Image: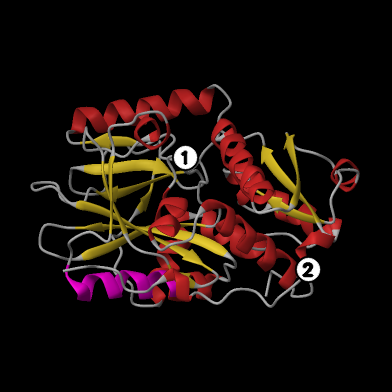
Amino acid sequence: MNATANQATDAPTASPVDLSKHTFLVLGGGPDGEREVSIRSATGIANGLKAAGLRAHLQIIDTPTLAELKALPGDAIIPYLHGPWGEGGPLQDLLEQDGRPYLGSGPRPARTAMDKVATKMAAMDLGIPTMPCWVLSLRDPVCPARLPVIIKPIHEGSTLGLHVCTSHQQFAEAVAAIAAERASGIDRAYMIEPKIGSDRPARELTVGLLDGVPLPIIEITPKDGLYDFQSKYNRNDTVYRCDPEIPEKIAKQISKATARLAKAIGCRHIARADFMLDPDGHAWFLEINTTPGFTDHSLVPKAAAHAGIPMPELCRRLAEMTIRDARRHPTA
């Protein structure tokens, strides 16, 4: 059964605006572990805007001051940094003070979406199924959940710092690695959650949102069974299936859940939520991302293209939403 729950071509586009009057400052880079991916995403967007006939200036940044940000050219900003600083609130604080219209979620929704525990709680409040989780305590050597489990940072993306533990020995090794990481000066909070599909393989599904409307569902099948950083960005053997063969009920469920959760958190313009479909046919929410990748391996551009929205048109829509919502406070 075809699993598409909505056609993104039906997504509401912004009110007509004269985009030719604007120069879009596209930001990439940042201080986080996904810096290189961010540069690739921002470059893709800048090229897409230019292909759509719009003026775009690509700027690679680290952690600029407000004065440095204000000095950069452009009258509207498309920030496309991945990671806690760039998409988790601090950059959004600067953008608010800068005052120019910008793409994406405001500071409060950005911080909520970056926090995997907070988003799980928001999902639970909405009745969206999600696995329980525990915050990792380095003072406790015993795993609080039944093995196998996943250990991952609460405030990171792209599976950075992820550990899969199928034995107590692996759990102990993961905890030791995280303790060593902390001793080296990298201070990240970690969470533990049950691994879905421990005895039989589960299916990974993702739903992109464009202006609040779900894009076609994509199923992700990494060659080695784990959709890690290498599988996402550097390898070419991961299989992506748009409109995968899943029950229509499940397709509608996860598409609706993505839209409801994004609205409840306060996300705007663009987002993507990830789910696991267990062998018994139950879909479990994992996390939501307010700045989904825009590289040649990324899922939102793939889903949009499948829905008949090529990259230049997709980027034009991002520009329209940025200008359209210039007077709407993004933290609401």
Q: Secondary structure at mark 2?
A: loop
Disc 1 vs disc 2: Cβ atoms closer than 8 Å? no
Residue 194 falls left or right of residue 58: left
Q: Exactly how many numbered labels are in the figure?
A: 2
Mark number displayed over residue 254: none
Please state which amino acid type lies under the numbered disc 2: Asp
Span highlighted in magenta in the image = 247-259
Picture quarter containing residue 270? bottom right
Residue 100 falls left or right of residue 129: right
The answer to which of 235 and 12 lies nearer the viewer is 12
10 Å neighbourhood of mark 1: few (<14), some, or many (≥20)? few
Picture quarter containing residue 163? top left
The answer to which of 270 and 74 lies nearer the viewer is 74
Give the main secondary structure, helix, strand or loop, of the magenta stretch: helix
Q: Is residue 100 visible?
A: no
Picture layout, residue 274 above or below residue 281: above
* Quarter of the figure with the N terminus: bottom left
Magenta-drawn stretch contains 234: no
Residue 204 falls left or right of residue 71: left
Which residue in the structure is indicated by mark 2? 18
Residue 14 falls left or right of residue 207: right
